């Protein structure tokens, strides 16, 4: 039996980095409870979100399924049933693990279901890899930051969500710059990093968290011949630096 697991390692890196950044930021402020209870809730929430992310594969297969000829109808029907079973498994298991978070946090985060709807529409139309769809997907992945922060502190932090989202969207643009290599994309990358500084300043977020984005600016000015795997490794390293900086400088 082949388990449908999301194999987009960049997505897992963003998700994991967002969760860790939230844990560090929450621990540096004021944990809601003494002892380790909030850690158990946070770990259950992270695991639950991981199941929901994996639901993407069978869900995508279901919404993209089309009519087949009679010769392939039986095989297609079996595949659709299998995808449906996996989708239900991931969703039920994920939501079950999220119950401790949902009891108190559902009313605060229900509005973000619009991101799920819009991303589902993009997948249904085959536009999953359009820039706006990728940003939508990263907005969902980085939503784990305020969710985990809530499980640790009991507070909502849209500042943390903005910080994590802005940082990792720069990674999306970085990949586009490496693929397109056009002046327009390179200028957009530089302007985005400058805009990120302004937004962080007005939100009273430490600008030190944006230090890794210096590499985005430098690489946009002096283009190097790099494989996408190398770009991915660089982005992973920058994500780790971002997590560490968040742990030290978030307030």
Image: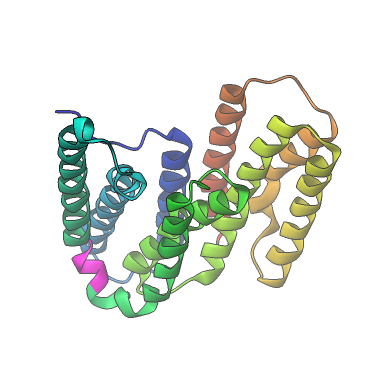
Q: Quadrant of the C terminus?
A: bottom right
Q: Position of residue 35 (x, y in %)?
A: 22, 62
Q: Position of residue 13 (x, y in %)?
A: 45, 39
Q: Quadrant of the N terminus?
A: top left
At a point 43% along the width and 74% down the height, the residue shown is 156
Tell me the magenta residue range.
Answer: 98-102
Residue 44 painted magenta = no
Q: Position of residue 187 (x, y in %)?
A: 84, 45
* Relative to 240, residue 204 above or below: below
Q: Quadrant of residue 11?
A: top left
Please name the colour scheme applied to the rendered image.
rainbow
Q: Quadrant of residue 74?
A: top left
Specify the farthest residue to the bottom: 107
| Left or right: 246 as drawn, with respect to 201 | left
Residue 251 in view here: no
At a point 51% along the width and 57% down the height, the residue shown is 139
Residue 204 in view here: yes
Viewer-side residue, 241 vs 175:
175
Viewer-side residue, 62 vs 115:
62
Residue 99 painted magenta = yes
Instruction: Tell me the chief SS of the magenta region.
Output: helix
């Amino acid at each position: 039996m082949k388990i449908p697991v999301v194999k987009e390692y960049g997505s897992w890196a963003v998700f994991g980095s967002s969760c860790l950044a939230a844990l560090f930021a929450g621990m540096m402020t004021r944990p809601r409870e003494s002892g380790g209870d909030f850690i158990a809730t946070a770990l259950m929430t992270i695991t639950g979100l991981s199941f929901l992310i994996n639901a993407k594969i069978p869900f995508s297969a279901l919404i993209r399924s089309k009519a087949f000829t009679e010769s392939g109808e039986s095989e297609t029907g079996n595949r659709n049933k299998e995808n449906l079973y996996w989708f239900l498994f991931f969703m039920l298991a994920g939501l079950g693990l999220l119950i401790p978070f949902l009891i108190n946090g559902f009313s605060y985060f229900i509005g973000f279901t619009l991101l799920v709807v819009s991303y589902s529409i993009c997948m249904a139309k085959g536009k999953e890899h359009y820039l706006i769809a990728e940003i939508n997907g990263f907005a969902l992945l980085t939503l784990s930051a305020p969710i985990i922060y809530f499980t640790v502190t009991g507070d909502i932090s849209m500042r943390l969500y903005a910080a994590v989202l802005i940082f990792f969207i720069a990674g999306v643009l970085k990949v586009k710059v490496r693929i397109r290599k056009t002046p327009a994309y390179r200028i957009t990358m530089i302007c985005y990093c400058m805009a990120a500084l302004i937004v962080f300043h007005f939100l009273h977020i430490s600008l030190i968290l944006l230090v890794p984005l210096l590499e985005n600016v430098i690489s946009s000015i002096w283009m190097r011949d790099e494989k996408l795997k190398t770009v991915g490794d660089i982005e992973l390293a920058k994500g780790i630096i971002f997590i560490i900086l968040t742990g030290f400088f978030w307030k």
